[in-house]
Image: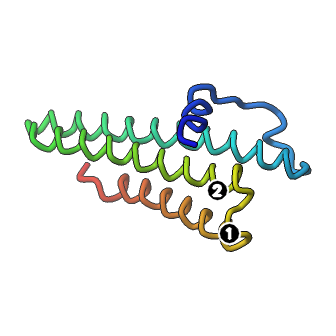
Amino acid sequence: MLRDFLRLLLRPRVDRKMFKCEQSQSDWSEAYERWNVIYVWSLVLTSLVLWLGRALWELSRLKLGTVFEDILFTVVDILLCTVLNGLSWYCVVKRLGFCGRAGYLVWALIYVFLSIGRLQTITWSQW
């Protein structure tokens, strides 16, 4: 499972089919898979940009200890988000929803909370 998801992460693909609203079930699974990969890469990029901005701010204030804390937090954040997205990919694409409609709702809520966490990182920072 993890190996398959990592293989997808190494080759993200964007095409016109991803933006179509009318698709068959297999097309929806493929679109979800591709959007999930794009989402993981956007989370990684966002985490790195936020870390860089915060690190530059902390270095300008000579707070070297917090730079190392932020490195650890960023690595854990990226790993956690990648694992959660890999798990959602497995449940939605490989297991065809896993828990039915309730399973889709659970994953939607997880994505909402992941996004809220990003917003909190931006608004709660000490910039």
**Distance Cα–Cα, label 1 vs label 2:** 8 Å
> In which quadrant will I find the N terminus?
top right
Whole-percent x, y for residue 69 in the image: 18, 44
Which residue is at 53% across, 41% downward? 2
Q: Residues within 10 Å of mark 2 (few under 14, many from 20)?
A: some
Q: Is residue 20 left or right of residue 47?
A: right
C-beta proximity under 8 Å, tags 1 and 2 = yes
N-terminal label among 1 and 2: 2
**Mark linked to residue 91:** 2
| Residue 67 x, y percent position in the rendering | 17, 39
Q: Residue 64, position in %: x, y? A: 10, 37
Is residue 32 left or right of 81 when viewed as pictured? right
Q: Amino acid at mark 1?
A: Cys
- Name which residue lies at 32% across and 46% down: 76
Q: How is the image coloured?
A: rainbow
Say which amino acid is labelled 2. Cys
At mark 2, the secondary structure is helix
Residue 99 badge: 1
